[in-house]
Image (spheres, rainbow, N blue to C red):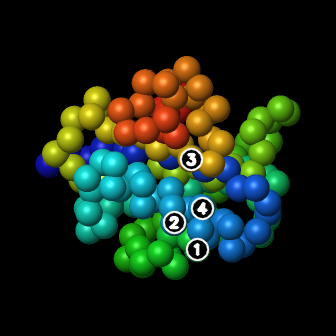
Amino acid sequence: MAIRAIRGATCLAANSAQEMNEAVAELIDNMLARNHVDQQDVISIFLTGTPDLTCAFPAAGIRIHGLTDVPLMCAQEMNIDGALERVVRILAQVETDSSRSDITHVYLRGAEVLRADLAATSTQDTSTAQETP
């Protein structure tokens, strides 16, 4: 079994704690499901939020969702002029038998534009893409 990283991002329509929790839970669910990863195979999760998200910690959405024994770390994204607003990004380290090329990175709720060049090639659906680090 190898350790792999799965990337994901989602956009919030508003700076709302309820929406934050729902969007983060939806994103982590999709990331794990699309990569056939069970919760017990999650090693740790790093989350970031853009500076305009001040309503809640993104990790709270993961804790509320049931991943209570996984180490989580939150940080603020760099404040870059013209960057997409109200974005939460996730980097999950997991144990999996999948090769690096088989990992599906998940982008939801408008975050697809972070890697629009790959959105059309997604094997899962048109709401996913891969983001450049």
Q: Residues within 10 Å of mark 2 (few under 14, many from 20)?
A: many
Q: Which dot marks residue 108?
A: 3
4 and 3 marks in contact (CB < 8 Å): yes
16 with respect to 90 (left or right): right
Instruction: Please report whichever mark, 4 or 3, sits nearer to the chain's N-terminal start.
Output: 4
Q: Please report the residue visible at 79 percent of the width from the left and 63 percent of the height from the top.
A: 15
Q: Which residue is mark 4?
A: 23
Q: Which residue is mark 1?
A: 60
User: Could you tell me how far apart the alpha carbons at marks 2 and 1 are, in whole angstroms?
Assistant: 9 Å
Q: Identify the image quadrant of residue 17.
A: bottom right
4 and 2 marks in contact (CB < 8 Å): yes
The amino acid beneath tag 4 is Ala
User: Could you tell me how far apart the alpha carbons at marks 3 and 2 are, in whole angstroms?
Assistant: 12 Å
Secondary structure under tag 4 reads: helix
Q: Is residue 76 shown to the viewer in this render?
A: no
Q: Please report the residue visible at 85 percent of the width from the left and 33 percent of the height from the top.
A: 81
Instruction: Please report whichever mark, 2 or 1, sits nearer to the chain's N-terminal start.
Output: 2
Q: Residues within 10 Å of mark 3 (few under 14, many from 20)?
A: many
The amino acid beneath tag 3 is Leu
- The residue lying toward the viewer, choosing from 12 and 39, is 12
Residue 107: x, y in percent? 53, 43
Residue 79: x, y in percent? 80, 42
